[in-house]
Each structure stands twice: as C-alpha cells, then as structure tokens.
C-alpha cells in the first residue's frame, strides 16, 4: 500500500468518509491529515461547474466554460491528437474552476442510432472510440486533473437506464463493449472511471467484481478510482467490496454509517476498506495538489474559442456534393434558410450541457464571408409542427438566390440524456420545407446539425449535404469556412447511416421492452453487421467526401504494420482518413467480415504523395475465447484491407499469423446465425448457445424493488399497480415537458 502511514492514522469512520461525498459534487475531506475535498464536474465537452445547488440535469446554471463540439462530432475527425488538444483545454478550464475530476469522455458503443446519448459518445466502433477517448484523457490529465471515462459498461440504452440488465455473451462484452474502455485505460491512463447505472449480466455495474476487479484492475492494470454514476450505487457496501470507491451523490451520511456498521459486523473486512482507501487517496492527494497549483490561473478563453472552432472544422463531414456545388464561389448570391442558422444547434441536452463563454451563430458570422446574402428566413419553428406562413416566406426567399443554404437537423428535445429517440427521422416540418424549397430552387445545400444519425429519404432533393454534427460554441464559423472552401472537409463518419431504421442490427431488440436488454445481435453492431450480412447503407462507417481526391497504392503488409502510398490527386490541399480493416475469409471462429484495427489521418498538399504506415497491435488479430477465458489468435491467413471507408476498400494484402493453440469454443451447427451474420431473428435456443446459459427471465416478477422502473408496473397482475403506472407515466410526460422548457430556456440564452 502506497499510503499505509496515512491510512493507519485514520479512524474507520474517516476511511469510510473517503467513499462518499459531502454534497452533489465534492468528496469529503479529512483536514486534520491533509486530505482535502475534491470536486467532480461534468462533463465530456466542456466544464459544467454548477454555481448553486447541484443537479444532474443541468437545470441549475453553471459557470461559463468553452463548449467544444460533442464527442460524436470530434470522432468524425478520426484524430486522437485533436482529442488530446481539446482535452488539454478542458483540463485547464477544470483546474481553473477548482475541478479535480472531469466527468468524461463518454464512450459507450452506439449500438442503436436511437440511443438518446449518442451525441455524447464517439462511435459504433470500439477501436475508434477507445483511441479518441485515450486522446482526450491524455489531454485532460496533463494539468493534473483526473479524467473519468464513462459509463462503464454496456450502457447503450437510455430507457430504464437505472433498472435494466444488459444481457450479453462474454465475447461480445469483451470485443465490442469493453475494448474502447481498455484502450482508454491502458493508452489514456485514466485516473478514474464511472460505473454505469445498469446491471451487466445480472449484477449492477457498480457492484460487478468481474468488471471492476477482474477486468479493470487485474487485467488492464487500472490504478485510479471508480465512481458510481450519480445514483448508480445500489448497495454501497457491495460496491466497495467489489471494486467501486466513490458513491455519488451524497446520501446524507446514510451510506457511510452502513459501511462502518458492515465493517463492525464483519460483513466486509477492514483490509478491503484500507485497500480502497489507498486506491482513492492515490488520486485525491495529487489531484487536490495540482488543482491548488492551477486554480485562478488566467485562462486564454479566446484561444479556447479558436480551438473549439478548429476542432469543429476538422470534424465536418461532406456527405454529398453533386456537380461540385461546394465550395461556393466568392460573391455567390445565397438565401439562408433554417432556424438553426439564426440560433445554433450546437450541443445536446442533459448533464453535459455547457454554459458557453460565447456563442457564434451563422447569421452573425456570415458577414465575415464574401457572399451576397439575399436574406434569411427561419422556415420552420425550432420544435413542434410546421408553420405554413414561415415556410411560404422561405420559399419566396429561395426564389431570389442562386444557392440556398438550408440549415436543418435535429432539435434539442430529440437528443437528450434519459430519453431514447423514437425514430431516425428529421422533423416533418423541415422535410416539408426542404421539398417546398427545392421545388423553386434546385441548388440546395443542406447544412446539418444533429448529434446522431438520421434517415435521409429526401437526400436526392438536395445537391449537397454537409454535416457539422453538434459543433460546439464556435462551429458556425467553421461551417462557413468549409462552405467557402477555406477548409477542405476531411471528417469521416464514425457511425453508419442506414437507409432506414429497420436495417439496424439491434432494431428487433432495441429498446428492450422488459427488464433485461438482450444483446442478441452479438458482435454485429454497425458496419460489422451491414458488411457481413450484405445490407446496403446510405452512408457507410468511415465515409466522407473532400474537395480533392486521393489515390492509394503500393501496399506492403507484415505482421507488424501496413505501409502504402497515399497521393492527393486533386487540385486542392486536404487530409484523408485512411482506415485499416482486418478480416479472415476462412475463419473457423465466427467473426465480422471486416473490423477496424487502425487508421491514419494524413494531410497532403495538392499533388503530394506520402508513405503511410499504420502499425498493427495486440488487438489486430485477437478474439475473445470463452473457453480459455482470454484473448486468443486463430492462426492462418488474414486479409489486411486499406480503405477510404468500411465499404470502399482500395488495397488488400495478406498476412499469415501464428495460432495461439486455443480450442475453437463454438459448434458451428449451434450458432448458424452468428456464423452467417444474419442476426435479426436469433432464436432463443441459439442466443442461449451463445450466452452459454439460459436466457434470464426479464419479466417483472410482481415484486417491485427500489430500482424498478415505473414501466414494470405495466406488467402488474393487480389493477392498482397498473393505475399507478398510468398516473406516473402522465407525471413523467409532464416533467419531460418541463425539462424541455428548461433546455429551451438555456438554448435561447
Ligand atoms: C450522467 C453522468 C453524469 C452525472 C453527473 C448522470 O446522470 O449519467 O454522465 O456525469 O449524471 O451529472
């Protein structure tokens, strides 16, 4: 133990105090021994330090801080170094506000495009998510502040997030849902991690020995502390016993008393308490020291604003560019249509909401660009039903310009913590507007703002689509730079865009209608599914256009690296995100047809060529073997594919790899759907074969416990419980509306 001397001087009560907080955000101190209180604050894309009473939903105001683009946006940059630069700014701002632990980044897997928090997460791919998260963490921790990757783990659904049980096989857990966290911990060196609300295979994440001790600490060598998500501590004693440290927020002393009593009653040993105290002190002591050093240090807020703009610019994805309508020529006569051009749609709703230091809007920024602006019309109300009069005015304006810049996307309420989306469509008012505008002016450039993927049945109506995701406080100007060609868009999608929601692999299983959330699609998430099962998509994972073109040639592959030549064959400078996928055509252990195992973002001047090397690593060929309970390698020949997206493979090489001599854990006849990738209707028996155990009964047992969701009462046998369900769901609708009004008020500020 590193802090044995200190711990020996502490009373049992003082030690137990270390594991709970004094309020919503601050740990308790033991001042007589120099252990100071440490502040934790959201969040992933900006510091949300609340001034007054704390709350999780950000209803109470917070100190101004730079609002960077959200994780879903920055993931499109495919640039962990950019994540690190953002992280450094976040860490500086945190420290200057005396925040010791910044609650982010969020890196849950986008299992479904409908998860309400997708805007806070990086990707459907764990490798990309992990690499991006590791970048943020390295940056945040440069100033001695601890980062806190979240939500550990398998928390890919908001519905009933506190009471659901994620049921999945160990291989899917390891390869899809944990690999990102593994990279974040090992390569980012995270000093804390947040356990999620849900259960994982029947055990709350915050009490899950397998996750917290066996995998996180023993296997990955994590040396920080675990904090429960706010309210995710189900049983504090069990949490501490199984590898969690800090319960958040305060329970007013109740949990500490229980913990002290549990030690006295011999229910948990004092050695465990000492061990956990040692682990958390190892972060509290240096973090509180660094914060003291940095607090009130002057910040260059303008520089951070510029950084937010640069980050937004590097993450813009050009999805369509018919007739090279973009970039616009100087002096082009444009009509700007769309409410989001007047008031930016730049971040999501929930605990991540940042109170920006300033906020750029398109209609203010456009004056700085050489465009002949014919006028502006909002065209649609920000939320709710369309307005024919607004639409008519927009159509009139569209007639007066050569090009229409049509700002569309998802509104605030569509993307929120605590709620999943009901569908993948844009608001009908915007689609109606788009159709009406294109009928009078075919030169429409759709400028999109949304933190998650959407269906685009209207795509052929516009000539170009340029997507800024949720661009942060300075994104409006970056988007105009891209539209004018001052920036050559180089972002590529970190998630697939299916043609329609029904194509998504988890669609039959999401959101779970019962207590258990069955991850029946297994490994086949996102492009892993579309590619293996041969399902066409609208825009594939890794896709993004540029104002230039790139050529790939001369691939050489060894078991250490892939090397090839990349040439900018167009007439403007630009960056390309080259992606390395690996597949095994003759695999005996089933696997997706190709999986991302490396990438490189390369900047090339027009006409320039560079030799690019993408290293292979311990994750390139491995799979998790449920028989040996560790990662193994199936020997033989692998295909190493270099692509401009998951479907646009430009070069392929073969490499032979040694076997680790593990037995094939699967019987192909019992797992036909997993071998074919056709996993939309996995029968119970086959899912059980994959799980290696019976499917847990997810129905409400008839007995409610404190974590049961209200919706469980829907299944109740007695009518009184069903009545309560009806009343409570009405109350929830009301509070949702109230929350929405609060978000709106914040957005309108
Ligand atoms: C969210 C976390 C957040 C915490 C504190 C929870 O509801 O899930 O992401 O960090 O609140 O605001």
Image (tube, rainbow, N blue to C red):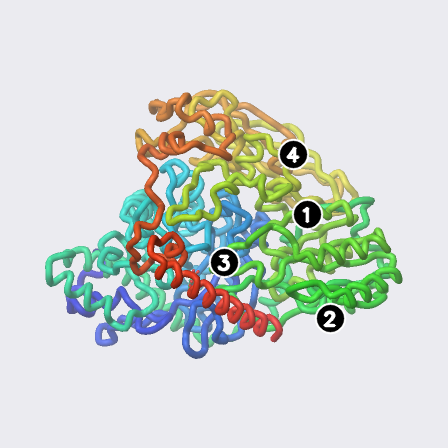
Residue pointed to by mark 4: 648
Q: Dot 2: what SS?
A: helix
- Left or right: 651, with 42 as reference point: right
User: Compared with residue 700, is residue 518 higher up or lower down, i.e. above or below?
Assistant: above
Q: Dot 1: what SS?
A: loop
Kindly report the distance in space between the C-alpha atoms of the residues bearing marks 1 and 3.
Answer: 22 Å
Q: Earlier in the sequence, mark 4 or mark 2?
A: 2
Kindly report the distance in space between the C-alpha atoms of the residues bearing marks 4 and 1.
Answer: 21 Å
Image coords of residue 531 (percent x, y) = 57, 32
Residue 117 can be seen in this image = no
Q: Dot 3: what SS?
A: loop
Query: Are the residues tagged 4 and 1 within 8 Å (C-beta)?
Result: no
**Nearest the eye: 578 or 179:** 179
Q: Earlier in the sequence, mark 1 or mark 3?
A: 3
At label 3, counting other C-alpha atoms closer than 10 Å, the crowd grade (few under 14, some 14-19, many 20 or more) is: many
Kindly report the distance in space between the C-alpha atoms of the residues bearing marks 2 and 3.
Answer: 32 Å
Select label 2 or label 3 by which is in front.
Answer: 3
The tag on residue 456 is: 1
The tag on residue 419 is: 3
Q: Residue furthest bottom?
A: 52
**Nearest the eye: 358 or 612:** 358
- Left or right: 337, with 535 as reference point: right
Image coords of residue 613 (percent x, y) = 57, 36
Query: Are the residues tagged 1 and 3 within 8 Å (C-beta)?
Result: no
**Nearest the eye: 516 or 478:** 516
The tag on residue 364 is: 2
Residue at the (29%, 69%) spot, across then down:
251
Q: Residue furthest left?
A: 265
Query: Are the residues tagged 2 and 3 within 8 Å (C-beta)?
Result: no
């Amino acid at each position: 133990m590193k802090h044995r001397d200190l711990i020996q001087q502490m009373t049992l009560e003082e030690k137990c105090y270390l594991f709970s907080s004094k309020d919503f955000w601050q740990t308790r101190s033991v001042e007589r021994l120099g252990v100071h209180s440490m502040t934790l604050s959201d969040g992933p894309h900006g510091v949300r330090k609340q001034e007054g009473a704390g709350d999780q939903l950000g209803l109470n105001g917070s100190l101004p801080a730079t609002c960077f683009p959200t994780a879903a946006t920055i993931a499109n940059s495919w640039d962990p170094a950019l994540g690190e630069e953002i992280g450094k700014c976040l860490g500086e701002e945190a420290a200057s506000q005396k925040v010791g632990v910044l609650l982010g980044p969020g890196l849950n897997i986008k299992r479904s495009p409908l998860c309400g928090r997708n805007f806070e997460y990086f990707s459907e791919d764990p490798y990309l998510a992990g690499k991006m998260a590791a970048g943020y963490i390295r940056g945040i921790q440069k100033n001695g502040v601890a980062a806190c990757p979240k939500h550990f783990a398998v928390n890919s659904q908001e519905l009933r997030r506190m009471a659901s049980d994620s049921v999945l096989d160990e291989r899917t857990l390891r390869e899809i849902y944990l690999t990102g966290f593994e990279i974040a911990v090992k390569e980012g060196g995270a000093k804390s991690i947040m356990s999620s609300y849900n259960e994982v295979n029947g055990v709350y994440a915050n009490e899950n020995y397998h996750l917290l001790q066996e995998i996180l600490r023993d296997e990955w060598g994590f040396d920080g502390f675990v904090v429960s998500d706010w309210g995710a501590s189900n049983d504090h004693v069990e949490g501490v016993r199984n590898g969690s440290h800090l319960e958040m927020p305060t329970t007013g002393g109740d949990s500490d008393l229980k913990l002290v009593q549990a030690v006295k009653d011999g229910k948990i040993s004092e050695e465990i308490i000492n061990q956990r105290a040692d682990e958390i002190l190892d972060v509290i002591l240096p973090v509180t020291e660094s914060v003291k050093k940095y607090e009130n240090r002057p910040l260059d807020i303008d520089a951070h604003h510029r950084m937010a703009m640069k980050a937004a610019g590097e993450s813009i994805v050009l999805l369509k560019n018919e007739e090279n309508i973009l970039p616009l020529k100087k002096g082009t006569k444009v009509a700007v249509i769309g409410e989001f051009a007047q008031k930016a749609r730049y971040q999501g709703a929930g605990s991540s909401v940042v109170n920006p230091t300033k906020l750029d809007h398109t209609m203010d920024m456009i004056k700085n660009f050489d465009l002949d602006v014919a006028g502006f019309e909002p065209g649609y109300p920000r939320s709710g039903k369309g307005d024919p009069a607004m639409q008519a005015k927009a159509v009139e304006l569209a007639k007066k310009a050569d090009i229409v810049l049509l700002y569309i996307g998802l509104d605030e309420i569509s993307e929120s913590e605590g709620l999943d989306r009901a569908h993948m469509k844009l608001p009908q008012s915007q689609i109606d507007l788009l159709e009406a505008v294109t009928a009078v002016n075919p030169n429409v450039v759709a400028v999109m703002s949304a933190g998650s993927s959407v269906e685009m049945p209207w795509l052929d109506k516009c000539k170009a689509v340029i997507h800024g995701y949720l661009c942060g406080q300075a994104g409006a100007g970056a988007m105009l730079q891209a539209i004018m060609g001052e920036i050559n868009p180089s972002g590529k999608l970190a998630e697939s865009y299916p043609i329609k929601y029904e194509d998504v692999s988890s669609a039959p299983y999401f959101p779970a209608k019962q207590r258990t959330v069955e991850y029946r699609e297994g490994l086949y998430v996102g492009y892993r599914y579309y590619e293996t099962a041969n399902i066409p998509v609208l825009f594939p994972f890794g896709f993004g256009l540029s104002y230039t073109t790139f050529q790939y040639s001369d691939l050489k592959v060894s078991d250490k690296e892939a090397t090839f030549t990349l040439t900018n064959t167009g007439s403007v400078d630009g960056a390309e995100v080259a992606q390395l996928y690996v597949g095994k055509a003759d695999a005996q252990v089933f696997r997706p047809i190709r999986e991302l195992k490396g990438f490189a973002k390369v900047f090339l001047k027009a006409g320039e060529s560079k030799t690019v090397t993408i290293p292979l690593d311990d994750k390139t060929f491995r799979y998790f073997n449920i028989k040996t309970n560790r990662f193994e390698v199936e020997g033989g020949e692998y295909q190493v594919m270099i692509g401009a997206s998951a479907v646009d493979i430009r070069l392929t090489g073969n490499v032979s790899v040694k076997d680790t001599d593990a037995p094939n854990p699967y019987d192909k006849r019992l797992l036909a759907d997993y071998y074919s990738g056709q996993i939309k209707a996995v029968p119970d028996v086959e899912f059980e074969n994959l799980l290696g155990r019976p499917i847990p009964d997810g129905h409400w047992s008839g007995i409610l416990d404190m974590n049961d969701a209200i919706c469980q009462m829907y299944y109740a046998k007695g009518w009184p419980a069903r009545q309560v369900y009806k009343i409570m769901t009405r109350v929830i609708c009301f509070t949702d509306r109230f929350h929405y009004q609060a978000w709106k008020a914040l957005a309108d500020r």
